Each structure stands twice: as structure tokens, then as C-alpha cells.
Amino acid sequence: MPSSEGLRLRPPRHRVERRALAWWTVQASLIPVPLILAAGALYLLIPPARFVFGWVLLAVTVPGVAYIAVMPQWRYRVHRWETTDEAVYTASGWLWQRWRVAPLSRIQTVDTVRGPLEQLFGLAGIKVTTASAAGDVTIRGIDHRKAVEVVEHLTRTTQATPGDAT
Amino acid sequence: MSTEPAGPEQRGTADSVADPAAVPGQRAGTAPVDGPDGPGWQRLSLRSVPVHLSWLLAPAATAAGTALGGHGTPNLQALITVASLTIAFGVVAGINLMRCLTTRYRVTHDRLEVHKGLLFRSRRTVLLERIRNADVTAKPLQRLVGLAAVTVGVAAVGSSGGSLTLDGVTRDQAAALRRDLLNRRAALLAAGHGGQVEQAADDMIAAFDLSWTRYAPLTVWGVGGLFAVLGAAYRTLHEMQVDPLELGVVRSAADAFTSVPVWVAVPVTLLAVAAVGTAGAVALYVEGWSGFRLAREEGGILRVRRGLWIHRSVSIEERRLRGVELVEPLLLRSGGGARLQAVAGGLGSAEENRSRGALMPPSPRSEVLRVAAAVLGDDRSPTERADLHRHPRRALRRRLNRALLVVLPVVGAVALPGIWLPAFLVAAGITAAVLLPAGALLAADAHRALGHGLTGPYLVARSGTFVRRTVALRREGVIGWTVSRSYFQRRAGLLTLGAATAAGAGVYRVRDVAEGEGLAFAEEAVPGLLAPFLVRG
């Protein structure tokens, strides 16, 4: 048994693309921005109710802006990924962080996923599924050409492994 | 319909011929089976026609009920309700009936084929080696006419997996089909591995003991179920424009309640609810578990049979058994009882795993442990044998904080009216005096529950106070690690380690373990997987 003194996980080798910052920022603003605009419009258009809508505006703006400002930066510092000949290793999250390791011998499928926003920023994600839904590993926010390479590598290596991966 | 070259044939099971390929373990009276191109097609029993028509009983009963309850003057709302019920149930009955009349199936030497449908024809072919299990169930009405359903679990790869149900075969057909499928599959697998089918006789591991029903009241279903039934009845009556509060029975009960002093009425009501709830829990327990038998059958199969009205039978392949989980809800634990769940693959979704993976009902803990050991082929349950490491005191602080997070808002809510009525401040004080120690006790218990360890091929993890779960998971069944840390866990130097597995709940967690200790534990449990990503300092 390895001694547990000072043992910790090292961050995976590769950062995600810097463009992912823009992608996360747009994604983070999808809900707060319309809310802020709506509250602001109501505040301006209905003078008698300004007292109420002033507070509403404050209540949606402060957490909304804080989220948009903090979340992408924080995520960018955390999100990392790495593939070796034995395993896929990722780190993700911001307040709540997760590190996942899946051995290539247990991988069942390797897919690329690209949402409309990701396509806009030239990004792609990789979804690696295993026989357990809880063991799935996803890498988001990497360059779409790079994603194709990684999928190629993973598929080649997993095909070489016999067994039904359970 | 008759697109088959040989044409569908109705064949009984009594006059069946012996299988020429005589699979070991097969007994007389099995279903007729011919070569891959032979006929051998069987249909569902015609006795299921009345079962399907029974769907129409519900609207009929509702109509009768309305006629009686409405004092002869049917209102429009009730009529519409009854009419739409009749149509909906009629459509369901019709679809089921059509499906039942057009279904044919056969087992060949390497596959199960099922054809069904008239307008939308479906033909499913399942390779026997992909079959994970075959279970026989029977609903009460089906049992009345001697029918059963066979559910065949198919290996899930992508979306093509799942299960296939033949609903409405005779009991003999069902038993024969199940035996046939499992024996042939076992023979195929054995041939594939160049080995022999082991011919172990059925080996009984556990059987229902009536004295176990004393644990039934310790399950929460009694009182909760009572409220669910009352709620559903109220909703239905309300939909039909009958106000249940105006019914004579309810009225006289309400009158009785208000005519006696509160200090009599409330305890009596509580006692009545508890009594009915207990009776309900016992009834549910007996319905679900009488006739329970857990046995090891030929072909490496663990089979659970149970149920009074609804017969359930679940087969678990020992090859896919990854361990067991000892489940001890707070009440049951206080009475010295426990339940046992299988951690097995091929049982379906996580939801299905919960209901189908049950290996032991709420029963004495010692008995459950004996069964756990027997199921895993061990002399002692690994959940007991493992020397569990306790988790640090920082984990206790997290649990105390959680308790405070629940207690403080409650106390605050009680104290709030105290601005106007000082009496509420006293009430808040009393609430705090009761809830704070209770929360602290629960937190301490939750911390005591935390533990992890290794024993032989098993990884053992324990946690939980409301429901304490101790899982023993085979280490080679771990197909990946997830380390998760919330902001507070990072500050406290703790982490939650999740072992992903293709069985049971899909992931089993070691909660709030010290960072270095948890990582070292993961590396020791599955050497080499985490090592390349670990550093010191």
C-alpha cells in the first residue's frame, strides 16, 4: 500500500482551449442576461412599480453578473484532460470539482459531441462511455480537429483490447 | 399473419416430444423444440383473453359506483369521466388483445424468436448467448386462469438491449421456456469455453420465515402507503364531483372527533393511523415476500422467487454478480434488522436494480449476513470481515454543519412570529432544545457509519445514518474512479471517491475520506489505475 502522506492527484496534462472561456461566458449569459434585460425594461417602463422592480433588478443582476464573471474563469483553471495508452483522465467543475479516470480496457464507445455554440467557437467535446453510466468521461471545450485525433487514438487502442468491457 | 412457411401451430405442452439435442438438466415436459428451420412455433394462451378484457371492469365499476353514489341523477361531469375511462380502457384492452392473439415465439438451438403484431409487425430475434436472465412473473388475474409472463433480459450494448416480455403463456409453457432458455444458453456458453455444464443440484440458500414479518412495521411503507391510498381515493372522488368530506361515513367520523376532548381525540387518531399503517406494512410485506426462496441453480444462476399474489422470480447470473450491499434503514437497524441487495449486472436500469436486485427482505441482521456470505461463496460476509478505517473528525464537522443547516431554518421559522407574540420565542427555544441534540446525535451516528476497507477480492465502503449502506464490491468489477470534491471538502482536505461498476447502482462511494488516504485506498484496491496520476507533496 502506498503511504498516504501528502498524496494527491496531479492535474491532467492538457488545458482546454482558451476559446472555451468565450463559449462558457456565452453559455452562462443565456439565462441571466434576458432576465436582467426584462427586469430593467419593466423598471424603466412602469414608474409606479419602480420600488418593486428595482429590487428585482438587483436580485437578478448581482448573482447573474457574478456568475458570468466568475464561472468561466474558474472553470478554465480547473478543466483539464489527458489520455495515455492505459486511461483517460479528466478534471472538471468549478465550485464542485471532479476528477475521473477510466481505463481504456473498459471503454465501450467514444463519441464526439458538438452543440451549436461549440460549433460557433470551433470547439468539440468527447464522450467516452463505459459499461456503467456513472463511469462515463466527457472532455469539453477542445479544438474540434484535436478531438478527431483523440477519438481516433482512443478507438484504435480500445479496439485492441479483448473482452466486453464489464 | 401466416407469413411463416410452416404456419403457426398451436401445440400443448403435455404432448411435447423430447428434445433431440437433449440439453443436460432438461426434464420431461419441456416445450417442443425443433431444428433451426423446423416449426416449433408456440402461441400465447387463449386464456389471456378474459385477462385483457378485465381492463373493462374498471370503467364498469366506476359507472356502477357513480350510478349508486349519484342518487340516480347522473351529472354530466361523471358521465364524461366514465365515458372517457371506458374509451381509454377499451383501447388499451384492444391493443393488448391484438398483440396477444398475434404473438408467436420459438426457441431454436441458438436463438429466441418472437413475432408479434398485425398492423405493425415486429420480429425480434435474440441470440441465446446474449440472454442474461429469464424470469417468470404472474399477476393475480393471470394466476386465476393459470397464466404467467416470461421476461427475458437481454445484454445491453448501446440501445439494442433491454428486455422482452411474453405476457400470457400458460404456467407450464413459462416454466419450460425459462428452463429451455437458461439451459441452452448455459450449454452454448460451456461449449464456447470448451467446458462442461456444471450439474450442481438446486442449492437452497434462504427461505421465507414467518417470524420475519415482525420487521415489517419497521419499514416506512405502512403509514406512508395509508396516506397515499387516502389521497388517491380523495382525488378520484373529487374528479367525479363527489365531495368526500360530505359522505356520511366521513361526517360521522368528523363528528366523533370533535365531540371528544382534544387530548383523547389526537392520541386515538394517531394510534388508529399507526395501527392501520402497521397492518398495511405487514400486508405489503406478506404480499411481497411470502414464498420467498433464494437458491443457487444449475448453470451458475442465483434465483429469487417471492410474492403471494404477484409471483416474482428473478435470476441473477453469478458470473455478473459483483458483490452485495447490506442496507439498514434507521428504524430497521434499531430493531436489529437489515436487507440485502445484489450488486449485479444485467438487471436493467438503476431503478429496476433496486426492485429486482433484492436478495433478502427486512429480516434479522445475522440471517442477512449468513446469506450474504453464502451468496458470495464465502464463510463470512465481507461486509463484516473487512477492518474498516474510520474517517477523520473533519468529516464529523461536515455532518454537524449539515444538521445545523436543517435545524436552524426550522427554529428560525418558529421564532419569527416572536416579534409580535413572545410565546413563539419560548416555542422556538423548546424546538431548538429538542432538535439540536437530535441533529448532533444523527451527525455523530453518520460519522460513526463512515468507513472503508479491503478484504480479499472485495472493496468495502459504509456510510449513511437514515439508511446505512455497507457495500462489498469485487475489486476487479471497478471500471473507473471518480473523485469529487465540493468547495468545503477541498477546504477540509476531504474527498468522495466513487467506484464505477457495471452493476447495481452503477457507482458506489467512499464519502468524506481524507485526501491522501482515499487516493491510497483507490490505488491499493485497483493497483495501477490511479498511479500514473498521483503525486506527493
Image: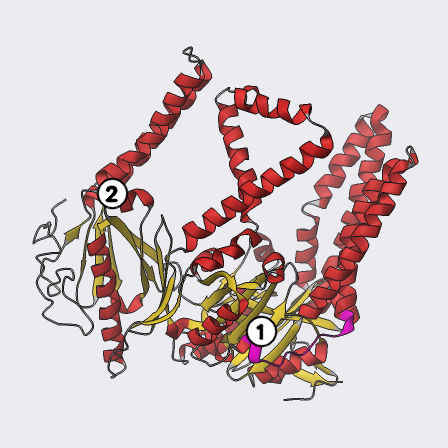
Q: Mark 1 lies on which chain?
A: B
Establish if B483 lies above or below B290.
below
- Picture residue at 75% right of the left edge, 53% below the top: A68
Q: Quadrant of residue B23?
A: bottom left
Q: How far apart are marks 1 and 2 (CA)?
A: 45 Å
Label 2 SS: helix
Mark 2, residues whose alpha carbon is within 10 Å: few (<14), some, or many (≥20)?
some
Residue identified by numbered label 1:
B481
Q: Which chain carries label 2?
A: B
Establish if B354 lies above or below B274.
below
- The nearer-to-camera label among 1 and 2 is 2
Q: Where is residue B481 in the image (x, y as percent from the top left)?
A: 58, 73
Count of residue discs: 2
Quadrant of the frame with the N terminus of chain B: top left
In the rendering, which numbered label is found on residue B99?
2
Q: Which of the two residues, B318 or B507, is positioned nearer the viewer here?
A: B318
Q: Do labels 1 and 2 share a chain?
A: yes
Magenta stretch bounds: B383-394
Magenta stretch: includes residue B106: no
Q: Is residue B290 visible?
A: yes
Q: In which quarter of the image is residue A101?
A: bottom right
Mark 1, residues whose alpha carbon is within 10 Å: few (<14), some, or many (≥20)?
many
- Picture residue at 79% right of the left edge, 48% below the top: A63
- Picture residue at 59% right of the left edge, 38% below the top: B272
- Picture residue at 82% right of the left edge, 30% below the top: A44
Give the amino acid type for the residue marked by disc 1 in the picture: Trp
Label 1 SS: strand
